Image (tube, grey):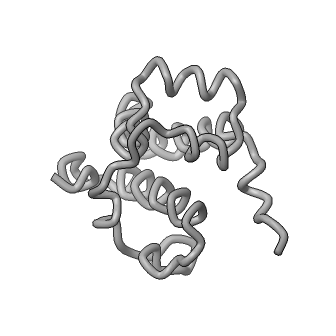
């Protein structure tokens, strides 16, 4: 089976789009970073290093220090597919991040986005 092409895309190439999406709705880069750190366990310095190294999505999630156990609480539809129904583990991780950034752009409170 062929891997989905997003797996080999650099996280750094998509990251600016997350920020733009959030900023268009009055949210901030620091909020985007907070979501990514919550989800992956990266520190801000580690996150910036991953971006600078242009790490692909597959490696970005493989190298994540501590995937948040509460990420399974992220539910809903992204790109027409229910996040909780995605069987491919890496695609599900990517879609968790997409869904959380969407929630940020839609004005949801950070406490709710971070499932507190």
Q: In this view, does 70 lie above or below 51?
A: below
Up/down of 50 relative to 107, above or below: above
Looking at the image, residue 81 lies above or below residue 67: below
| Image height of 59 relative to 85, above or below | above
**Looking at the image, which is closer to me, 17 or 36?**
36
**In the image as oriented, which residue stretches furthest toward the top?**
45
Left or right side of 95 for 104: left
Q: Residue at x 50, y 57 (%)?
A: 98
x, y percentage for residue 28? 39, 33
Residue 13: image x %, image y %? 71, 38
Quarter of the image where the N terminus is located = bottom right
Quarter of image, res 38: top left
Labels in figure, total: 0
When asked about the image quadrant of residue 89, the answer is bottom right
Residue shown at 44% from the left, 57% from the top: 102
Q: Position of residue 101 (x, y in %)?
A: 44, 51
Q: Where is residue 59 in the image (x, y as percent from the top left)?
A: 65, 42
Query: Which residue is at the front of the view, 28 or 110?
Result: 110
Q: In this view, does 115 lie to the left or right of 84?
A: left
Horizontally, residue 57 falls left or right of residue 63, namely right
Q: In this view, does 84 lie to the left or right of 95?
A: left
Q: Which residue is drawn at 52% across and 46% down?
A: 21
- Which residue does the image show at 59% across and 72% down from the upper left? 88
């Amino acid at each position: 089976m062929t891997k989905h092409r997003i797996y080999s895309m650099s996280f750094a190439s998509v990251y600016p789009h997350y920020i733009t999406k959030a900023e268009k709705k009055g949210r901030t880069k620091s909020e985007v970073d907070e979501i990514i750190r919550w989800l992956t366990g990266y520190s801000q310095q580690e996150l910036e290093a991953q971006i600078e190294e242009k790490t692909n999505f597959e490696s970005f999630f493989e190298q994540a220090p501590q995937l948040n156990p509460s990420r399974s609480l992220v539910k809903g539809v992204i790109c027409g597919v229910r996040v909780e129904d995605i069987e491919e583990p890496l695609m599900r991780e990517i879609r968790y991040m997409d869904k959380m950034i969407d929630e940020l752009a839609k004005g949801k409170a950070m406490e709710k986005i971070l499932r507190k």
